[in-house]
Amino acid sequence: MEAFGLLLHGFAVLLTWKTLVLMMVGLVLGIFVGVLPGLGGPNGVAILLPLTFTMDPTSAIVMLSCIYWGALFGGAITSILFNIPGEAWSVATTFDGYPMAQQGRAAEALTAAFTSSFIGSLVAVLLITFLAPMISSFALKFGPPEFFAVYLLTFCSFVGLGREAKHKTVISMSLGLLLAGIGMDTVSGNLRMTFGSPELLRGINFLVAVIGLFGISEILLTMEERLALRGHAASISLRVVLGVWKDLPKYWVTLLRSSFIGCWLGITPGGAIAASFMGYNLAKRFAKEPESFGKGRIEGVFAPETAAHASGTSALLPMLALGIPGSGTAAILLGGLMVWGLNPGPLLFVEHKDFVWGLIASMYLGNVVGLVLVLTTVPIFASILRVPFAAVAPMIVVSCAIGAYAIQNAMFDIWLMLGFGVVGYVFKKIGIPLAPFTLALVLGNRAEDAFRLSMIGSGGTLKVFWSNGLVGSITTLAIVLLFWPLIEGLLGRVGWKASR
Amino acid sequence: MALLLSAPAVAGWEPAKPVEIVVAAGAGGASDQMARMMQAAIQKNNLMKQPIVVSLKGGASGAEALMYMKSSEGDPNKVLIAYSLIYMLPLSAKIPFNWRELTPVSVVALDQFVLWDNSAGPKSVKEFVAAAKAASAPFKMGGTGSKREDHVLTVFLEQKTGAKFSYLPYKSGGEAATQLVGNHTEANVNNPSENLEVWRAGQVRPLCVFDKERISYTSKVTDTQSWADIPTCKEEGVDVQYLMLRAMFLPGKVTTEQQAFYVDLFHKVTQTTEYKEYMEKQALKPIFLTGKDMVQFLEEDDALNKSLMTEAGFVAK
């Protein structure tokens, strides 16, 4: 029970007034950005990251991760009340949540969403608590070939498992890899693609790109669509909450299935978005009367929300133990760790116990506090949407610009952010997914370094990627995932023949 | 140059704004740690009225910091904490930078280099060289960055011993240390501070130090060894020596009074207990050079580094 002792130690680190206050502030900010269409987890964390640079790492990560939990909770509010998914992973929640609200069952739908979010992340945190020490003890086995294999797995799973058209995912990823190459190349010590510009020496900062790609582009889209916001009054009474909770055991299969899907997709970087859709689709597939989905069925809220939260939470495990982010927000948190002088990866669990277990403890506390907070503050947050978009939009743009500038104190980065805003807008218009682009931008450099170091170390033979059981199985899994749609089709055909 | 030679401290000028210590490396690296030590020493001992902030400009292997200093001409509120990159980066990556365009303040320390291997590996330099020569697969040497001090040392080690190494450039000394512990490399030439923690944990072994004399600190670092117990590489039959400067620079075109203020400030810093404790903990060689002596030191050091880089074939055409 080493994990249990360490967890208690984590709670001890956490239970100071300062940390608790930061936690509350983080949750409120998170719910706020989750409710605002266009902002959201990655943006909220990216914008607020520089504010935490002066804090000690534990306080900073607790606050940032609470913003993350808050955003996860907040995303559901607008999906259900206004049919506007505040977060991409809340899209599936609108399918049944919005019809429920129209039928006057908004409170019921919101309670269902919050409760299932809570269950999803609780399952994922339990997983992290008991798996993390195991992962870190074998993490020292990771040399350049192992790291490259994991990066390869990440890229391949995006292509193989993503919902988007394969060629669009590959285009998006390639562009990200190209931009990741700008700046100093560690292996050769030469400058690449800087065209003599001192501004490009630093390379393209991932956070600047993310703020532009997601935040600014969403504003552009909303402006174009002249979004009319009209809401339904929502208040939650204790009676409704208890009513939903009483029915909860009936849906245990759905909850368990969605938690499992979420954890799996969170650890293999598929992201919360894929998980919520997968959770919804599977619940529909296994339901007795699938046609009632989409017409205000409470299960249709439980399934995607549980999966989204489970994957959002478990995505932090590979980031902490291996230094590889499972989601966009995790990637931004990873950047934060480096700023605070913590080397994410193998030795983090050994060298910074206080930090790691403080964070894990904050996941437990943050979720409980978050649940209470959202259940009590729904009407207040819903009123945000009564503020006209014309007033909210400039505020969002200004906060994005401040965020982009503050990362490296560079004016150039604001122009870069605006440029990425336009790129993001165009990508959304022509249906090119943004996630592979950002993934390649944050991992491209490291994947390249790991590959070239493996080649130097092996004398140039690709056999090094199958040189031991660990690296061999990861590499093979990566290739299987890359061709998964083909393999699945093949298996399907064989199964079809057999059943005939 | 006349500006640099007029040394005597005139008490007159003082910063009116917070002073920025510019670090040409990432968070947690040796330069960053030193900058934070100076920040603490200055604030605790009230050496300056204005607050001091550390600003990390480690982009492009530190080139970001060099270009930042170059473009801050005439601004007396920025001090660069420099190391050998001021000679090497302009040569290897053709960065349009020349340290002579900045205003030298003082050399505050010299950093050592040590040859390390995994504690499960060969126990002496002789066995190490024999193992490297006998190895059939590439014998891997880890280090920070490419065509920099670690890489140059590796090339010279090859020339003096006849062994062949595959040099693996990592992003930081910390990463090079972790990879040696995990047995993914056979050795590295990290600074004492970069391998201190893993040495204390018994995971790596120091084989020799690249200096003409042993490190002077005799208090125990591990259970059995002190820094002074590490033999020099020359004693072990491999005559390779290299020391790296840690020096402070102001941007170009600042006034003599402004330069004099900082000469005095950093001289006071070297007298503090914070500085002395830091030097011992990181096994740095104390030194204080300024004015004419400093410029002479820099010119000689520049010539040495240039010849090393040229011989190693690292100068970009």
Image (spheres, coloured by chain):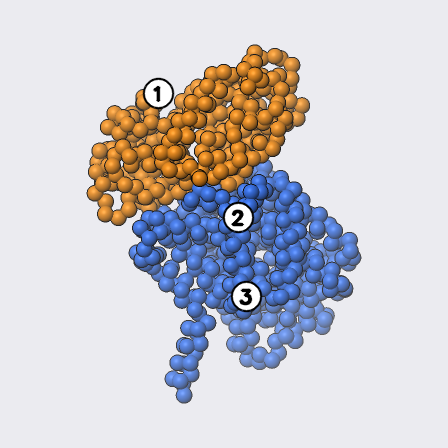
Chain colours: A blue, B orange
Q: Considering the image in quadrants, where does the C terminus of chain A appear?
A: bottom left
| x, y percent for residue A391 | 78, 53
User: Is residue A324 toward the left or the right of residue A382 in the image?
Assistant: left
User: Is residue A459 toward the left or the right of residue A355 in the image?
Assistant: left
Query: What's under tag 1, amino acid-wise?
Result: Ser
Residue at 42%, 22% in the rendered image: B300
Q: Which mark is residue A193?
A: 2
Asked if badge 2 and badge 1 are on a common chain, one would say no
Chain bearing tag 3 is A
Q: Secondary structure at mark 1?
A: loop
Q: Nearer the viewer, residue B263 or A365?
A: B263
A294 is higher (above) or lower (below) than A264: below
| x, y percent for residue A273 | 56, 63
Query: What's under tag 2, amino acid-wise?
Result: Met
Graded by Cα atoms within 10 Å as few (under 14), some (14 to 19) or many (20 or more), the crowding at tag 2 reads: some
Q: Secondary structure at mark 3?
A: helix
Q: Are marks 1 and 3 in contact (CB under 8 Å)?
A: no
Graded by Cα atoms within 10 Å as few (under 14), some (14 to 19) or many (20 or more), the crowding at tag 3 reads: some
Residue at mark 1: B216
Query: What's under tag 3, amino acid-wise?
Result: Lys
| x, y percent for residue B10 | 61, 12
Q: Earlier in the sequence, mark 2 or mark 3?
A: 3
Chain bearing tag 2 is A
Q: Which mark is residue A482?
A: none
CA distance for labels 2 and 1 = 46 Å
Camera-nearest label, 1 or 3: 3
Residue at mark 3: A168
Q: Nearer the viewer, residue A373 or B55?
A: B55
B183 is higher (above) or lower (below) than B287: below
Q: From where the camera sits, is residue A320 visible?
A: yes
CA distance for labels 1 and 3 = 62 Å
